Image (tube, rainbow, N blue to C red):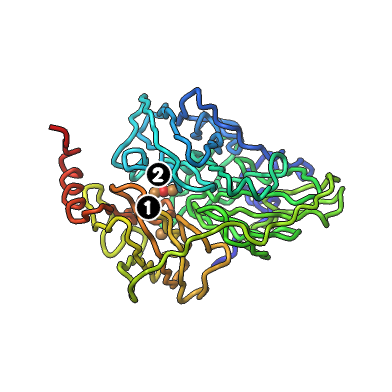
């Protein structure tokens, strides 16, 4: 992999913009904390003036913000929201990591037209986790996300509450992504069909921010909202993984470095108890010389909390078979098993409630972050490449990162809603290019498939007399 290491100074010297940072002494901006969503108003996709693009228009934001407002719901509650599209193009509102009925899933087949609003409502029937929301219109997802659309969605529950994890000021939400800026107010989109990466890292929408934290244990909840970039994170203080896409892991795992691919989430405890007040540490990515976030340490109230040895109970899925039930070959930058995405094509039907073993494979084009709608899965094997399931991939996942030439096997069970869902690469240019397919799950899989095929061509079948 070519090194993308570059200092901010050398970027400025290369004429790559960053006027605010070109002058050596300019201070790092404060790390913004994402605003909480106000349910009394619609969540609105709109054009926005984004700070990282010099405060000029040209970007997009939910409620004008990048990242969008943080949505918080309790497990077991009803999620009811109005969504509005104030853009001049179609969009959708997909709740990534939430198990939603097909009609509320924000799939490309059900766009929210410009100038319109919709109400979305479904029960939260899953445990505590950090999820997120983003646009999903076919062929335009990559551009809309790159322009700034994406926000966090937090579910809390009693199991998590009982652990007494660091909260309030000691819990930090970090949305990572990258951007390309061509001068003051010029957000560029250097489209690459194999995945667009920008030269500038963003944390909560700003470049190389700073923040101040107490010399205590803090909880870092991280989303990779980039189109294609994989982040490899480390910090100058002990890091422990406690959770991922699907919530808490069974047990904590100390790490030196963690990888987070597009759409994945991480829940980390950063232990600053040994960090001297007055000093600072950096949250770093292996590709950038400057720390993504510079963390200044201040004295904090004593912290005697210890990470519990058992974090959560995970039911291991059991598969009654030997080989994989399905194999998905991710090819080039635009197809799965030789076919590009067709919104009217439904590829297969999965028996509702049955555990299946799926195999993801690719010879090239990696990394592919592979995502499934409608259910979470468990990663059970990886052959080739890294040759192991990483410690942060245990528990429940909705996206798994696959480098070439890795072969990754997962166990999956659809048991929440019967309906039509998607499997795709979450490198957004691959997804838009067609590395995506539709499937259905139903108690009578054959009937579900026939029905979905007719509906895909002719619209919903009416079942009431
Ligand atoms: Cu994060 Cu199908 O999407
Ligand atoms: Cu891909």
Give above or below for 158 relative to 195: above
Image location of residue 252, percent across then percent down = 64, 61
Residue, x 67% and y 62% (percent of image)?
309
Task: Locate residue 260: give its quadrant.
Answer: bottom right
Q: Position of residue 55 (x, y in %)?
A: 60, 31
Can you tell me whether the CB of the residue at mark 1 lies under 8 Å from the nearest atom of ligand 1? yes
Residue 278, percent from left and from top: 87, 48
The residue to which callout 2 is attached is 141
In this orientation, does residue 331 appear? Answer: no
Is 21 placed above or below 398 here? Answer: above
Please state, as top left, top right, bottom left or bottom right, where the C terminus lies in the image: top left
Say left or right for 153 vs 24: left
Mark pair 2, 1: CA separation? 8 Å
Q: Residue at x 59, y 32 (%)?
A: 36
Q: Where 322 falls versus 58 (above or below)?
A: below
Give the residue pinned by disc 1. Answer: 431
Label 1 packing within 10 angstroms: few (<14), some (14-19), many (20+): many
Quarter occupied by the N terminus:
bottom right
Looking at marks 2 and 1 on the same chain, the residue that comes earlier in the sequence is marked by 2
Which residue appears at 47% of the width and 67% of the height?
A: 403
Residue 350 left/right relative to 203: left
The quadrant in which residue 365 appears is bottom left
Ligand 1 closer than 8 Å to label 2 CB? yes
């Amino acid at each position: 992999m070519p090194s993308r290491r570059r200092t901010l100074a050398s970027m400025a010297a290369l004429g790559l913009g960053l006027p605010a940072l070109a002058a050596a002494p300019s201070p790092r901006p404060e790390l913004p904390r994402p605003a909480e969503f106000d349910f009394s108003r619609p969540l609105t996709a709109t054009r926005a003036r984004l700070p990282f693009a010099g405060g000029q228009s040209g970007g997009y934001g939910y409620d004008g913000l990048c990242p969008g407002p943080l949505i918080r719901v309790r497990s077991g509650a009803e999620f009811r929201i109005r969504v509005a599209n104030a853009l001049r193009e179609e969009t959708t509102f997909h709740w990534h990591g939430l198990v939603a009925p097909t009609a509320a899933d924000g799939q490309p087949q059900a766009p929210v037209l410009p100038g319109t609003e919709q109400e979305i409502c479904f029960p939260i029937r899953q445990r505590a986790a950090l999820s997120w929301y983003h646009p999903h219109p076919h062929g335009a997802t990559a551009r809309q996300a790159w322009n700034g659309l994406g926000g966090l969605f937090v579910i809390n529950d009693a199991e998590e509450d009982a652990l007494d994890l660091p909260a309030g000021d000691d819990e930090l939400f970090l949305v990572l992504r990258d951007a390309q800026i061509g001068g003051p107010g010029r957000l560029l989109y250097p489209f690459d069909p194999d995945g667009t990466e920008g030269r500038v890292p963003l944390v909560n929408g700003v470049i190389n921010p700073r923040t101040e934290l107490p010399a205590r244990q803090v909880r870092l909840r991280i989303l990779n909202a980039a189109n294609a970039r994989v982040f490899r994170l480390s910090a100058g203080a002990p890091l422990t993984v406690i959770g991922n896409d699907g919530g808490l892991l069974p047990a904590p795992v100390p790490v030196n470095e963690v990888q987070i691919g597009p759409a994945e989430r991480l829940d980390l405890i950063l232990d600053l108890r040994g960090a001297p007040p007055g000093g600072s540490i950096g949250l770093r990515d292996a590709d950038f010389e400057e720390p993504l976030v510079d963390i200044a340490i201040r004295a904090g109230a004593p912290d005697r909390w210890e990470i519990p040895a058992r974090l959560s109970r995970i039911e291991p899925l059991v598969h009654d078979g030997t080989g994989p039930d399905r194999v998905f070959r991710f090819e080039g930058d635009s197809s799965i098993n030789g076919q590009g995405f067709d919104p009217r094509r439904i590829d297969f039907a999965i028996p509702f409630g049955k555990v299946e073993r799926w195999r993801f494979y690719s010879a090239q084009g990696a990394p592919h972050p592979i995502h499934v709608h409608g259910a979470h899965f468990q990663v059970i094997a990886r052959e080739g490449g890294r040759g192991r399931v990483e410690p942060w991939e245990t528990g429940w996942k909705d996206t798994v990162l696959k480098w070439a030439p890795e072969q990754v096997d997962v166990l999956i069970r659809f048991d929440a809603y019967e309906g039509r869902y998607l499997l795709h690469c979450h490198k957004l240019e691959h997804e838009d290019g067609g590395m995506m397919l539709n499937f259905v799950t139903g108690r009578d899989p054959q009937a579900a498939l026939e029905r979905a095929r007719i509906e895909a061509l002719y619209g919903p079948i009416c079942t009431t007399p």
